[in-house]
Amino acid sequence: MSHSPVNSSLVLPRVTPTFCRKHVCLIALLLAATVVGAQPVINETEHLTQQHPDSTYRLLKSRLDRAMSGPNPLATGDYLQQIGVLLYHQGSYVQAIDYLLQAQKIFRTAEDGNRLAQNRNELGTVYYYNEQVNQALTQFNEALAFYLKTRNPAGLARTYANIGHIYEKKKDIERAFSYQKLALHNSQLANDSESLTKIYENLGSIFEDEARYDSAFVYYQKALTLSRQNGDEVGQIEIINNLGDVFRKTGRYQQGMALSREALQRARQQGERYQLSAALRDIAKTFKLLNQPDSAYSYIEQSRDLTDEIYAAANNRQITLLQTLYDVERKDSEIAQLNAQKRIDLIILSASGMVLLLIGVLGVVMISRQRLKIRNERAANQQNQQIYRTQHELMQVALKNKQLQEENLKGQLELKSKELTTHTLQIIQKNQVLEELKHDLTVVLKDEKRDQKKQLRALVDKISLSFNQDKYWADFRTIFDQVHPAFFQQLTQRFPELTATDMRLVALLKMNISSADIATLLGISTDSLRVTRYRLRKKIGLSEGESLSAFIHSFPVQSQLSPENKLISVP
């Protein structure tokens, strides 16, 4: 029994003669069909891809490269799918799966459900023949879900047939038959005679495996009738071989032999070497059953020789295709390397140009900035020189003014010192005169002349009262503050318990007045002056051995008159 293909668009490899004119024309039809996604043309060019896979691959690859650089991604997906189908027919299942998965990704991104479902059927078929049955079933089920949603009977017929064939391979005859019946129903709704032919053939195969030869014969006859109506000469050969198997398995050897010889003749006419080998093998089996071993051996040897030729030719085509794949990939790699090198050279050239341009711009900018900096520095230097000259002149004027002020202040200080000294001397002289007068009056009072005693005592009291008056001391302090600014202020801040008499004593000590003159100025005796100095030392907190005069002279006060304390304005 010869098993039918899983999908009407994907069949097992068959060998056809080489016709150059047909080769060129059908390749053109194939490429045109892939642009618009026309699946029927693929079936017509199936034999062409078998006989000339290398040429077909080169053309498809060339169109694929153009499509990838174009704006239509679906065209790219179509070409990827066609290359995948081509590789599948040559037995390169892994590479076929890779191309079909690339196409599937594009169709999924474009959300083209029809193309995606068709791709899943193609990919499931490749998985099936690559012994990845579970992956194949997954792809078929996803395609089935889309066709059920869109209620596409033609797609449902093909997908149900594929799933049924998988369950037949798993020996789940009940499910296989159920799915094939669903495929049959949808194929009838779609009025797809080609798909219906394959489904009839699949049902016949199931019944044949179950040894239900009458049912198998009925479905094979239906398949043969449709195949003749469609003009499918190659398909008829396979069905006739299957009918011959049914007759042989039911003991009708002569009828089976007649059908096998008919299949043999048709295969020779069509150049179908695969079906020719199958017919020779079936005839050998029939001769064996007829107990004619010599004839059986002869035909089985012819079948083996033909099978060897078929596989040798297939191997040669695969080697040629692999060499073509290698050459194309190497060429693509070289082109990619050249393009990459060109891009790198262009990038390097562009980068070099940009760098040179940037260097030029940077140089111009640096020169401009340097010139601007020089101009700014020159202007700044000129401005600084002008400012320096102006400041220098102002400083000279200020210095002269300060010198004049210092000279003026110095003159005032000397004048005030002279005034203070003069004033102090006047006070001393006055007090000395008063002291002499007081002495004389005291002598007079000692006289017994009672008439003048009362008047003289009053005179002495007036003189004594004059000693205690602060009028002269007020003038003295005013002049002293001008000569020694802030001296009394700092002294009272540090020693707030000092009395007016203490302050007068400190001022006189500051002026280096002798003790005798100080006693005279204060109107006290020398002994009283010592007592007063002692009390002042205690208030100031001086220990024994420390000089009161030295402390007063070193007391921190301003050394010169400040503008705030000047009483006489500088002219």
Image (cartoon, rainbow, N blue to C red):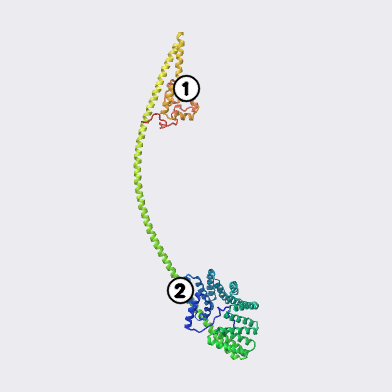
x and y, in percent, of residue 17 in the image: 50, 84
Given contact means CB atoms under 8 Å apart, are the residues at marks 1 and 2 in contact? Answer: no
The amino acid type found where label 1 is placed reads Arg
Question: Label 2's element?
Answer: helix
Residue 283 visible within the image: no
**What's the residue at 35%, 39% (across, down)?**
394
SS at badge 1: helix
Q: Residue tagged by mark 2? A: 331
Image position of 68 with respect to 386: above or below:
below
Judge whether residue 230 can be spotted in this image.
Answer: yes
Residue 514, image quadrant: top left
Badge 1 is on which residue? Answer: 530
State which mark lies toward you, 1 or 2. 2
Q: Residue 255: x, y in percent?
A: 61, 89
Measure the alpha-carbon separation of dots 1 and 2. 128 Å
Pick the front one: 197 or 561: 197
